[in-house]
Structures are given as C-alpha cells and as structure tokens.
Image (cartoon, rainbow, N blue to C red):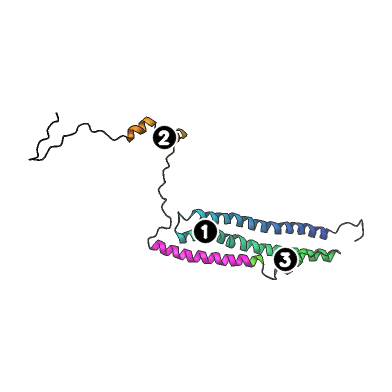
C-alpha cells in the first residue's frame, strides 16, 4: 500500500473487531477468576466457622456447593465462549494478513499451543470432578443421617456469661488485709463459758491449798 493512499475499509473494520474481541477475551477470564476468588472465600468461611453449626457431612455439602456451582454455571459456559472468541481472533489475524503485508499470529499461535500439554482447563476439570464427587458422597450420607434422626443443623450452645470487673474492684481484691485485722484473724477464738470438769465417782476431792 503506497503512502497517502486511503485506508482500506475492510482492514479498518477487522482492526476494530480485533480490538473488541481481544478485550472481550481478556475480560472473560478476568471475570471467571474473580468470581472463583469470591466463592472460594465463601467455602473457606463455611469450613472455618460451620463446624459448630452443621453436621459434618452436611457441612461438606455446603462447602463444595459454591465452587461446584461456579464450575457448572460459570466456568464451563464462559470457557466455551472464550474458546469461540479465541477462534475468531485467530481468523481475524488471517483476514488482516490476507489484505495487508502484516503477519499477525499472536492468537493463532496461542490457539495452536493451547491444545498441547497439561493446561489450566485440565486442572479445573479435575477440580470439578472432585467437587462433584464430594457433593454426591456427602449428600448421600447427609440424607442417611437425617433419616436416622441426626439433626443436620446443630443447636447453638448456651452462651457463657462473663463477669466484668472494674479497675477499682481489681485493686481491692489484690490489696492485702490490714495488719490488725490479720492478727485478730490469727488469734484462736476464746470460749465465752466453760463448764468445769466433774470428777468421777469415788475420787477424793481436791483440797484447797493453804
């Protein structure tokens, strides 16, 4: 294309579509992992604080449900949409290259390499299978426990009342008693009245001294 020639409308259209598709492709996976981080926090909170409130199998059902829901309702459809977007990006590169002297092949090479080796999607599929297995096994055990009369939601334990003391009360408890009071407490108690001992029968009476 010579300098000063008007731009090719087809190339300009492909360039605009290429920019929009690239931005869409990036936003798809940003949204995927952002939602995953939020639901992972929910799962962690359930496992941390739910042990005292839910039956153990039912707790695992609740904990696995957010991430299983993410895998089925968010990751699977959006990842498929991302693959379609990647295919279109590679096609746009071929169209632009055919109309100009450029050699765009960023997304084309990425698509070719994404089918090789162990990729992130394989790890996510394994995670989804494990989550489904945990949900199914513990869901079955939860139903059996409920049928046997085991409550799935545990009663809240009674609250422990705390006794609050002010700083002045603590000082009074820590102060030793006064010296005079301690001495009086140490003296043995004196008997107010004492009955004289009665001598046994037949014993000679004691004579008073002169």
The quarter of the picture where residue 29 lies is: bottom right
- Label 3 secondary element: helix
Label 2 neighbourhood size at 10 Å, few (<14), some (14-19), many (20+)? few
In the image, residue 136 sits, relative to residue 199, either above or below, namely below
Indicate the position of residue 200 as horizontal and vertical percent values: 10, 40
Q: Residue placed farthest to the left in the image? A: 202
Marks 2 and 3, how far apart at CA: 85 Å
Q: Where is the C terminus found, in terms of image quarters? A: top left
In the image, residue 187 sits, relative to residue 117, either above or below, namely above
Marks 1 and 2, how far apart at CA: 56 Å
Which callout, 2 or 3, points to the residue nearer the camera? 2
Q: Where is the N terminus found, in terms of image quarters? A: bottom right
Which residue matches tag 1?
Answer: 63
Indicate the position of residue 201 as horizontal and vertical percent values: 8, 40
- The residue at 19%/33% (across/down) is 194
- The residue at 70%/68% (across/down) is 114
Nearer to us in this view, 90 or 6: 90
In the picture, measured across the screen, residue 97 lies left or right of residue 73, that is right
- The residue at 75%/63% (across/down) is 89
Which residue matches tag 2?
Answer: 176
Q: Residue placed farthest to the bottom in the image? A: 116
- Label 1 secondary element: helix
Q: Earlier in the sequence, mark 1 or mark 3?
A: 1
Q: Residue placed farthest to the front in the image? A: 210
Marks 1 and 3, how far apart at CA: 36 Å
Q: Are dots 2 and 3 in contact, CB under 8 Å?
A: no
The quarter of the picture where residue 25 lies is: bottom right
Which residue matches tag 3?
Answer: 87
Q: Which residues are magenta?
A: 122-149
């Amino acid at each position: 294309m010579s300098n000063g020639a008007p731009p090719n409308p087809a190339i300009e259209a492909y360039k605009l579509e290429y920019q929009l598709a690239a931005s869409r492709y990036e936003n798809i996976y940003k949204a995927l992992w952002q939602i995953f981080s939020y639901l992972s926090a929910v799962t962690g909170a359930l496992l941390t604080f739910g042990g005292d409130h839910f039956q153990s199998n039912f707790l695992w059902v609740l904990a696995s449900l957010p991430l299983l829901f993410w895998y089925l309702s968010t990751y699977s459809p959006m990842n498929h949409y991302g693959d379609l977007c990647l295919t279109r990006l590679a096609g746009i590169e071929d169209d632009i290259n055919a109309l100009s002297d450029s050699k765009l092949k960023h997304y084309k090479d990425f698509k070719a390499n994404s089918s090789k080796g162990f990729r992130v999607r394989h790890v996510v599929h394994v995670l989804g299978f494990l989550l489904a297995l945990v949900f199914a096994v513990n869901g079955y055990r939860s139903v059996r426990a409920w049928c046997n009369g085991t409550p799935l939601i545990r009663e809240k334990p009674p609250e422990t009342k705390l006794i609050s003391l002010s700083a002045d009360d603590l000082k009074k408890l820590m102060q030793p008693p006064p010296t005079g009071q301690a001495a009086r407490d140490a003296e043995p108690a004196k008997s107010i009245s004492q009955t004289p001992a009665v001598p046994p029968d037949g014993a000679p009476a004691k004579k008073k001294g002169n």
